[in-house]
């Protein structure tokens, strides 16, 4: 009878332990489900941010390409303007040389007239 009582007590302890373990497993399942939900939210957030990054990267690449094209146009215009400026400088230089030669010739003529 004592053995049966001891076995019954042991069975009760085991049943209590099983119930406690079942509750822990259920709590762990709930925690795991919560973590799975958080992971899904984080993944969705990451995918949205990645998509936004790709979009921004595309815009920046387009802006960079546009900027390079604008720089090329500006360089072309600048070189054209520099070429025009060089042409004007050469024209003014030639005009100054002509004026200087004319002035020198007139100065010589004036000196000769004064000498007479």
Image: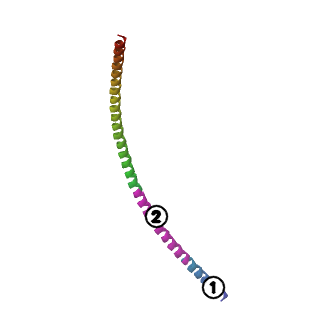
Label 1 CA crowd tier, 10 Å (few <14, some 14–19, many 20+): few
Q: Residue 60 at what x, y percent from top left?
A: 39, 50
C-alpha span from label 1 to label 2: 49 Å
Q: Residues within 10 Å of mark 2 (few under 14, many from 20)?
A: few
Residue placed under numbered mark 2 in the picture: 42
Task: Please give the name of the residue rendered at 47% of the width and 65% of the height, measured from the top-left corner.
Answer: 39
Residue 7, percent across and down?
63, 84
21 left or right, relative to 98:
right
In front of the other: label 1 or label 2? 2
Q: Quadrant of the N terminus?
A: bottom right
> Badges 1 and 2: C-beta atoms under 8 Å apart?
no
Q: Which residue is mark 1?
A: 9
Q: In the figure, 36 relative to 115: above or below?
A: below
Q: Is residue 9 left or right of residue 91?
A: right
Does residue 48 show up magenta in the picture?
yes
Spot occupied by residue 34 in the image (x, y as percentages of width and height): 49, 71
Considering the numbered disc 1 on the image, is that residue within a helix, a strand or a loop? helix
Residue located farthest toward the bottom when viewing the structure as drawn:
1
Q: Which residues are magenta?
A: 23-52
Majority secondary structure of magenta residues: helix
Q: Where is residue 116, by image quadrant?
A: top left
């Amino acid at each position: 009878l004592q053995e049966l009582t001891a076995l019954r007590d042991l069975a009760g302890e085991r049943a209590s332990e099983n119930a406690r373990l079942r509750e822990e497993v259920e709590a762990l399942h709930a925690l795991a489900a919560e973590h799975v939900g958080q992971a899904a939210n984080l993944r969705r957030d990451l995918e949205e941010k990645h998509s936004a990054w790709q979009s921004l990267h595309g815009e920046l690449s387009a802006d960079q390409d546009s900027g390079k094209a604008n720089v090329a146009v500006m360089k072309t215009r600048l070189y054209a303007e520099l070429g025009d400026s060089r042409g004007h400088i050469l024209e003014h230089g030639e005009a100054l040389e002509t004026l200087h030669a004319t002035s020198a010739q007139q100065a010589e003529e004036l000196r000769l007239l004064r000498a007479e």
